[in-house]
Amino acid sequence: MSAIILATTGGPEVLQFVDAPVAAPGPGEVLMRQTAVGLNFIDTCCRGLFPLALPYGLGLEAAGVVEAAGPGVTPGRRVG
């Protein structure tokens, strides 16, 4: 999968486009194929205003389809 991450806080220059591994979902988790991702003001704030664990992936708001599910979750549903 491709992702935009930041390994350090700062301006747009800290954004990195990378290939990231995809983990299998655990209990109560899903693997979602994102079909629409909003990069909004909240993502701008994550580059330095809000404390967060680094590295961090952008795209807090998304919609897509559940591709795989851990125990207790039904796959194939549209989610947002």
Image (cartoon, rainbow, N blue to C red):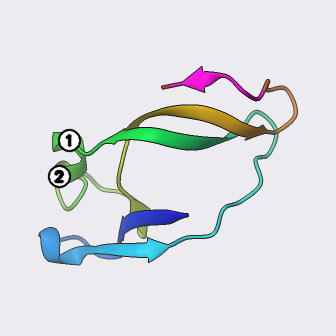
Residue extent of the magenta highlight? 75-79
Query: Residue 43, relative to residue 10: is it above or below?
Result: above
Amino acid bearing label 2 = Thr
Specify the principal SS of the magenta part. loop
Residue 58 image point, x, y percent: 35, 55
Crowd band around label 2 with a 10 angstrom C-alpha radius: few (<14), some (14–19), many (20+)? some
Residue that numbered label 1 is attached to: 40
Viewer-proximal residue among 71 and 36: 36
Residue 80 image point, x, y percent: 48, 26
Amino acid bearing label 1 = Asn
The answer to whether residue 35 shows anywhere in this view is yes
Residue that numbered label 2 is attached to: 44
Q: Is residue 47 left or right of residue 24?
A: left
Q: Are marks 1 and 2 in contact (CB under 8 Å)?
A: yes
Q: Secondary structure at mark 2?
A: helix
Residue 42 image point, x, y percent: 22, 42
Q: Quadrant of residue 75?
A: top right
